[in-house]
Amino acid sequence: MLDVPLSPAGCTRYRRVLTAGVVTHEELLIGNRKVLTWDHSPTRSTEQRDADQDGFVERVRVIDRTAAGAFVRTETTEYSPVTQAIIWREVIVPVVAGLRVTQQQADNSGNLWLVANMIVSDAGFDQAASGSSATSVTGANCSAAQLDAAKKALSHGMGVGLTCLQHYKDTGLSLEMMFHYVARDVVIHCMAIPPKPNGKIVGARLHNCGAGQPCPSFNDPSSPIEIDVNTNFFFGLDERDQASTMFHEMLHLNFGGHGGRPPEWDPVESCQSLCFGAGSHPDGPMNPTQCSCATCLRTSKCDPRCKILPSCDQEGLGFLCPCPTGANAGRLFRTCSECLATCPSGLGCFGYSTCIPITQSGCDSTPVSCP
Ligand SMILES: [Zn+2]
């Protein structure tokens, strides 16, 4: 068994069990308590997390693959540490156009509602560029100087990012990020990445994560993390933007793809901006707002940790048709009245008479409802 102390006093440790040369179990411990474990079989990886060390697992992630390693399904469920009820669930399955991501969130009565239903396409893991590690970082097609710069950026990015998440008291997310960083090898692929059709420059992206590609970095946590770095762009960035870009790519390992969401509603963009700010690249992350803070920390904009930031650019995303099947299932409408008029058509949605406001303003004195 590999056993690595992660902090100077050895308070946080990473342990790994190999069976017949293959990693079958991994864990992060704080003191003697397991706070995060992964179990791996050839076709399934299962994560359990108990960030507050109370003996109750508040997050479970199950990733299924075929025997050949092709991605089948990811399901992540989070439970309230207080009531132990389900508060959030995300399912990701492959579809022809990429990955379908559905998310459900519990309301105050404990009912799970569909809050997102999106296709993450090939752009999903790109990044418009802007501690201590137990990993081995190797390069593919990188010069010695390029690999050195990428390693430094990764280490700098994770150092700042983990310190930032701990500052915001997001123990769960910092444990997830720490796990990926300390448990997995990293391969940096140096390559020229052409601009996207819309002209946007990609600084870096997860390797092999385009539409229909297996994306092992996200889908198989027992595999190495593979990051493509754009040799036409990345190495010209200043050190801060390189570090910020690497932290962005590492956030994808926990949050998955972008899914075409506005930046303040995209946890990868939101956490990057919360920890690094806007950066110098015009297409890079924005300055953090109350909404991006809330998205990153999965809280409301009224959370004291977020309230001190500038107000949101886009507080409301729209109104969501809550029915589970049919043409309008999970469809987002700009206004409440459009949603109420169109949502209930079709068999699967018949009888639905309310839509769900997707907004960060629910913590204000007058919560939004529809109708
Ligand atoms: Zn990205």
Image (tube, rainbow, N blue to C red):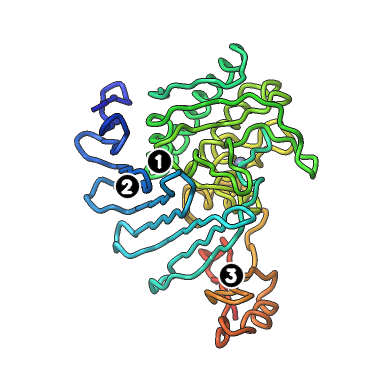
Q: How many residues crowd around disc 3 within 10 Å: few (fewer than 14), some, or many (20 or more)?
A: many
What is the secondary structure assignment of the residue under circle 2?
strand
Residue 330: image tag: 3
Cα separation between marks 2 and 1: 9 Å
Give the x, y percent position of residue 209: 59, 42
Q: Which residue is mark 2?
A: 49
Label 2–label 1 contact, CB within 8 A: yes
Give the x, y percent position of residue 159: 47, 27
Cα separation between marks 2 and 3: 29 Å
Q: Quadrant of residue 53?
A: top left
Is residue 58 in sight in this rendering?
A: yes
**First-in-chain label (3 vs 1):** 1
Tell me if 331 is positioned left or right of 218 in this view.
Answer: right
Type of amino acid at the residue the image marks with label 2:
Arg
Tell me if 122 is positioned left or right of 61 in this view.
Answer: right
What is the secondary structure assignment of the residue under circle 1?
helix
At 66% from the left edge and 57% from the top edge, which residue is drawn?
314
Vertical comparison of 229 with 33: above or below: above
Cα separation between marks 3 and 1: 28 Å
Q: Residue placed farthest to the left in the image?
A: 32
Q: Nearer the viewer, residue 10 or 369?
A: 10
